[in-house]
Amino acid sequence: MTTSYLNDTALKSKASFSPKTLLRKFHSKVLRVKFQAKTLMANPHAKYVVSVVFFIPLEVVAALMYCVLFGIQGDKVWAWRTKPMPMLFVIFTAVAFMLTYGLNRFRVLILLGLTLSLIGDIILISEEHLHFLMGLGVFFIAHVMYIIAFSIPPQDGYPRVQVHLVRAIPFALLFAVVPPTLALKMLEKENPDFIMIVAVFAYGLVLASMGWRVAARVGYPMEPLSSQIAALVGALFFILSDCLLAFNKFHTRISLAQVWVLSTYWVGQTVISFFSQKFPWDWSFELAEVQGEIGQTLLKKSHSASQLEIERESKKSR
């Protein structure tokens, strides 16, 4: 009895390592992975997550190339090649977001702001005076898009976004300090550029207003709080970037200014575009078990086929 049992065990063990059996087991595992992948991609968040995983590394690489090749080494050829790329990848991700979650007024306005920012980036590659004014004007309109986006409900029937005048105080103080400081420095020149001074005040006003409206949206009941805080952090990075740019151009030269200006700018825009509606921990993309009659049936067939193959090999060995 014991000898027969040991012989049967040895035969089954031998059969389990035969090429055909191993191939069956491999095929069964492939089926499981395939169904798990299908289940993951059926999740409404998965396509957007895949696009983020794909585009964020490209954005980081392009940003690093710009900072090293132009910001540090001063190669202007690479400025034209690399400066637009990070924002382009941000826009691609924003489009993927809209294709996944659908369109509304908020998302369209954010996309318009991102697109105008990309245009402004390209214009500002040139250091000519006229191009700087043109770029400033394009970014002015981009901020107007952001102001409208964060001031209105995303869809009809949603509650209004509160005004929150108290939250405007820090941004009003920023506007009361930065543009006058820059203007006084610009007036020290022999031939002050009054058009540029007016442009600085106008841009400072719209920049402060953008920060205020993003701050006012924090606590809006129809969106996750974490997303609203993230959008505020992105807006603050954007404001910091513009302040660094203005001080470097009109007040005091900053070492590695391009690196600091654009790194904070790209971080701000990325956070605003990625997280102004949803934040990763507000999503639920745990991998669900393989479900559905078809998937379960195929898995059972694969498992049964593997067992039959083991039994056949066992019988042949006998």
Image (cartoon, rainbow, N blue to C red):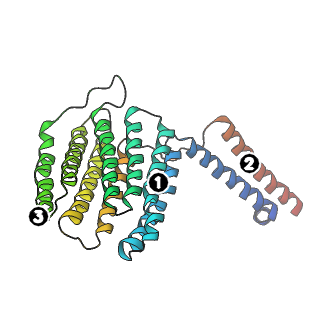
**Residue 79 coordinates in the image, percent (x, y):** 43, 67
**Residue 105 coordinates in the image, percent (x, y):** 39, 32
Mark number, residue 302: 2
Q: Nearer the viewer, residue 300 or 220?
A: 220
Comes first in the chain, label 2 or label 1? 1
Amino acid marked by disc 3? Glu
| Residue at the spot 16% in from the left edge and 47% down from the top edge | 171
Closer to viewer: mark 3 or mark 1? 3
* Image quarter of the C terminus: bottom right
Quarter occupied by residue 188:
bottom left
Say which element carries label 3: loop
Q: Nearer the viewer, residue 77 or 240?
A: 77
Q: Residue furthest bottom?
A: 73
| Residue located beneath label 3 in the image | 188
Q: Are marks 2 and 1 in contact (CB under 8 Å)?
A: no
Mark number, residue 88: 1
Comes first in the chain, label 2 or label 3? 3
- 159, above or below 94, in the image: above
| Residue at the spot 77% in from the left edge and 60% down from the top edge | 23
Quarter occupied by residue 301:
top right
